[in-house]
Image (cartoon, rainbow, N blue to C red):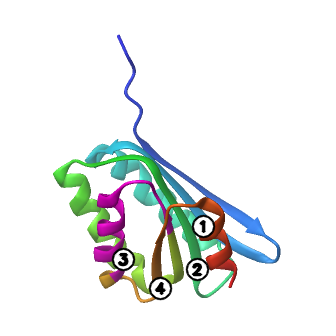
Amino acid sequence: MSTVRHGLSIGIERVGSNFFLSLKAIGKLTHEDYQVITPMIDAAMKEVPTAKIKALFDVTEMQGWELRAAWDDFKLGLKHGSEFEKIAIYGNKNWQAIIANIGSWFISGEVEFFEEHQQAVDWLNE
């Protein structure tokens, strides 16, 4: 029997004097994941000490969403979209770049997709 991993890790990273909300998605996200994730993201967003948040979202191990989880993600984006200055999405699949582009429609800040982690971090630090 194999164990299926899925979910989202949330943290606050510091690079130099800048703070970033860091997120890493793993597997196929479910509605139940968002029931746990949403309050954690809400709490993490309150901890970032800037008016506009820079975020690094690692989706290299993400396989997608269940339909209801995609809706949960959309609602979360609407709730916090105006709080972001920049979101760097670090991924390795074409569909992730397309989703990043669509997601940028709902975020007031800049959203960019990167295939290299260091390029994403450098862009956030600009």
Callout 3 touching callout 1 (CB < 8 Å): no
Q: Is 50 left, or right, of 40 in this rendering?
A: right
Q: Main secondary structure of the magenta part?
A: helix
Left or right, 45 with respect to 39, comes to right
Q: What residue did someone put label 4 on?
A: 110
Compare marks 3 and 1 and give the one earlier in the sequence. 1
Q: Say few, some or many: other residues with alpha carbon within 10 Å of mark 4 (under 14 / 14 to 19 / 20 or more).
A: some
Q: Is residue 82 above or below residue 93?
A: below
Circle 1 crowding by C-alpha within 10 Å: few under 14, some 14–19, many from 20: many
Residue at image point 40% right, 81% down: 81
In the rendered structure, which amino acid carries the disc numbered 3? Lys
Q: Which residue is mark 1?
A: 21
Q: Is there CB contact under 8 Å for labels 4 and 3?
A: no
- Which span of residues is magenta-colored? 89-104
Q: Amino acid at mark 2?
A: Ile
- Residue located 49% across and 83% down the image: 83
To which residue does mark 3 refer?
A: 79
**Identity of the residue drawn at 44% across and 54% down:** 92
SS of the residue at dot 3?
Answer: helix
Q: Are marks 2 and 1 in contact (CB under 8 Å)?
A: yes
